[in-house]
Image: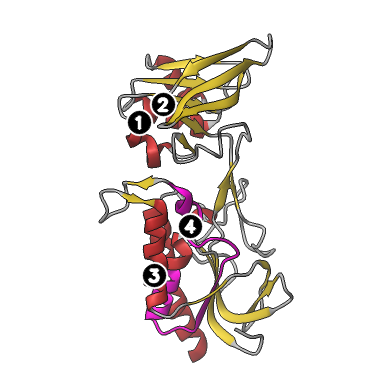
Amino acid sequence: MSEDELYDVIILGGGPAGLTAGIYAMRAALKTVLIEKGLPGGQVAITKDVENYPGFIEIGGFELCEKFLQHAKHYNLEIVDKEAVKTAPGIDFHSVHLVDGTVLRSQVVILAAGGTAHKLNIPGEEANFGKGVSYCATCDGFFFRGQTVAVIGGGDTALEDALYLAKITRKVYLIHRRDAFRGSRILQQRVFAEPLIEIVYNTVATEIQSNDKGVCGLSLKDTITGAERSIDTDGVFIFVGFRPNNQIVPAGIKMNTSGYVITDEKCETTIPGIFAVGDLRQKYANQIVLAAADGCTAALAAAHYIETHQGS
């Protein structure tokens, strides 16, 4: 990698979306580099078990990411362990600025920076991630079938996932720091009508308790009286917000009010030649298989874009 090189494709982010884009870009014989400042695999790499990725009844998150990575390396994808700090759109080429001052140019940039779930930052949360602490009910709810879980949050996602978990678990505690939910009225009505959901208002979690098997309880504090208590729970699902990592998205690209990039069906943004994939892109659901599909779509569209651009 040097500033003198001109790439066909620069991929920013090494999660499932970015690595899949790399695989398809290399198969299309595009000169491609993937920039990833951290551990390839993204959020999936620190997930204990994955049971909803086609072809694997059960596989560890890190193991699945290793398979993505080895597949990409099989095609000799260039992977650079550095941080990208700026994407600068151009007419013929786009530029990507790295933290060390290096500037790379390419015809296509695929933004695959993912997103980050907001955390409570309480004792036991980080240590038990993947061991009973989750930020995605549709990803991990299956592991708690017939058990007791706690959902923390008051927005649409918290209410939707509490309802989802009520279908497969024995009991759901729905814990909210205020005296009313922020979620939509229809979701609230459904929650109120669900007998397996116990609502706990005006309460915050102060500690996630665990034993050698993982999460076993949750310490709570009443925000009005200050009273403290503990509940037994096998899992804690935290939904206090999710932030797309859009700091690298250049001005001029359309985003929704939550900061997700709006694209067309090819994953192309409002700036030609710049694509957004994975958890950074506005779409119906965030799942590993959908992130991989985004990466495939963007790489195929990138190949077509480059072919058309060169022929003009």
Disc 4 from disc 3: Cα separation: 20 Å
- Mark 3 belongs to which amino acid? Gln
Mark toward the start of the polypeptide (1 vs 2): 1
Tag 3's secondary structure?
Answer: helix
122 and 115: which is toward the camera: 122
The amino acid type found where label 1 is placed reads: Phe
* Residue highlighted by disc 3: 70
Q: Secondary structure at mark 1?
A: helix
Q: Foreground mark, 2 or 4? A: 2
Residue at 57% x, 16% y: name it. Answer: 201
Q: Which residue is mark 4?
A: 278
In the rendered image, the quadrant that contains the N terminus is bottom right
The reply to whether callout 4 and callout 3 are in contact (CB within 8 Å) is no
> Could you give the CA–CA distance between mark 3 and mark 2, rounded to whole angstroms?
35 Å
Q: Is residue 156 visible?
A: yes
Q: Nearer the viewer, mark 4 or mark 3?
A: 3
- Say if the magenta span includes residue 31: yes
> Disc 4 or 3, which lies upstream in sequence?
3
Inter-mark Cα distance, 3 to 1: 31 Å
Q: Nearer the viewer, mark 1 or mark 2?
A: 2
Query: Which one is earlier in the sequence, the residue at label 2 or at label 4?
Result: 2
Residue on which disc 1 sits:
144
Residue that numbered label 2 is attached to:
234
Write the start and end of the magenta stretch as one range. 20-47
SS for callout 2: loop
Q: Nearer the viewer, residue 258 or 170?
A: 170
- Distance from label 1 to label 2 (Cα)? 7 Å
Of pointers 3 and 2, the one earlier in the residue sequence: 3
Q: Is residue 265 visible?
A: no
